């Protein structure tokens, strides 16, 4: 298998372009599935406090033959722990993971109505300075939210994890991230399967002898994003990382770009969700 490319972060570290997402994976399933993902070649593992599987994910990492320093682990603080509880929430996550540090810690949603994400960010900066967190990032932040963070603290996130897939391509959001030196990371990169039945995607997949999922994930890498597909299927775990022995042409990229929809969002709106 070809090596997984990495993208530079604005703090001098790097992040793999393809990772294994642990959303909707139970704590009981997590150790085995994380172990399978690491064996298949994944080095980025993404979880969150809200997923309820940090203990299982941590066990999968600890029991793997892959050295800890080769693994890029992400977890996230949930909305109800923002503000004064932020440091405690992080320690709880670290305790469940049974690890000494996490590679990337994210604010899961901005929850702008609560006005606590700046206070949360300041707590995260302190934890980073203590060596408990290697890189700081956010999830579902808009350009407005990013501007507030940078303006209030002087510290820009390394990563912004947002909903992004061919039916919801987020060109403005990606441009805003790029302007600030932030890597855009896609959650639900396969659109929860909706795009995999699209005739354009299907035709491109057949032309390359690949699956529709591989085509969509390859598209993510070619637009310069990180993607974290989730699956509990061992065959798809391997398929989803087997992306770097083919390349989409400029015409194929143009065809996929044309699939973007104004109403393509499938998840909550960050401006109102909390």
Image (tube, rainbow, N blue to C red):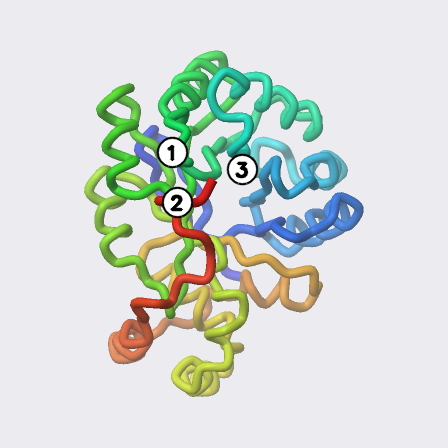
Callout 2: few (<14), some (14-19), or many (20+) C-alpha neighbours within 10 Å? few
Residue 74 at x, y percent in the picture: 53, 37
Q: Residue at x 61, y 50 (%)?
A: 23
CB atoms at circles 3 and 2 under 8 Å apart?
no
Q: Position of 149 compared to 239: left or right?
A: left
Q: Position of 181 compared to 110: left or right?
A: left
Residue that label 3 marks: 74
Q: Residue at x 45, y 21 (%)?
A: 124
205 up-or-down from 165: above or below: below
CB atoms at circles 1 and 2 under 8 Å apart?
yes
- Give the mark, 3 or 2, whose residue is nearer the N terminus: 3
77 up-or-down from 229: above or below: above
Residue that label 1 marks: 113
Q: Secondary structure at mark 3?
A: strand
The residues bearing labels 1 and 2 have C-alpha atoms spaced at a distance of 8 Å
- Give the mark, 1 or 3, whose residue is nearer the N terminus: 3
Q: Secondary structure at mark 2?
A: loop
The quarter of the picture where residue 255 lies is bottom left
Residue that label 2 marks: 272
Which quadrant of the rendered structure holds the N terminus?
A: bottom right
- Extreme right residue here? 28
Residue 267 at x, y percent in the picture: 47, 56
């Amino acid at each position: 298998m070809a090596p997984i490319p990495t993208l530079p972060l604005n703090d001098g570290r790097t992040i793999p372009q393809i990772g294994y997402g642990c959303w909707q994976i139970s704590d009981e399933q997590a150790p085995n599935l994380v172990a399978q993902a690491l064996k298949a070649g994944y080095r980025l593992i993404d979880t969150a406090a809200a997923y309820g599987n940090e203990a299982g994910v941590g066990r999968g990492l600890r029991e793997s033959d892959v050295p800890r320093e080769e693994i890029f682990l992400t977890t996230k603080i949930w909305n109800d722990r923002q503000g004064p509880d932020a440091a405690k929430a992080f320690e709880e996550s670290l305790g469940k993971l049974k690890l000494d540090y996490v590679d990337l810690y994210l604010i899961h949603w901005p929850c702008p109505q609560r006005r606590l994400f700046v206070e949360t960010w300041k707590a995260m900066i302190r934890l980073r300075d203590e060596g408990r967190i290697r890189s700081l990032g956010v999830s579902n932040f808009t350009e407005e939210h990013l501007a507030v963070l940078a303006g209030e603290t002087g510290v820009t996130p390394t990563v912004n994890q947002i909903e992004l897939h061919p039916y919801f391509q987020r060109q403005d959001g990606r441009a805003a991230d790029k302007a600030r030196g932030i890597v855009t990371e896609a959650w639900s990169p396969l659109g929860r399967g909706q795009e995999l039945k699209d005739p354009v995607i299907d035709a491109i997949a057949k032309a390359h002898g690949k699956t529709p999922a591989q085509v969509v994930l390859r598209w993510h890498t070619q637009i310069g994003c990180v993607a974290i597909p989730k699956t509990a299927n061992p065959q798809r775990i391997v398929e989803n990382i087997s992306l770097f022995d083919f390349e989409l042409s400029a015409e194929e990229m143009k065809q996929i770009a044309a699939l973007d929809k104004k109403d393509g969002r499938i998840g909550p709106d960050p401006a109102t969700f909390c």
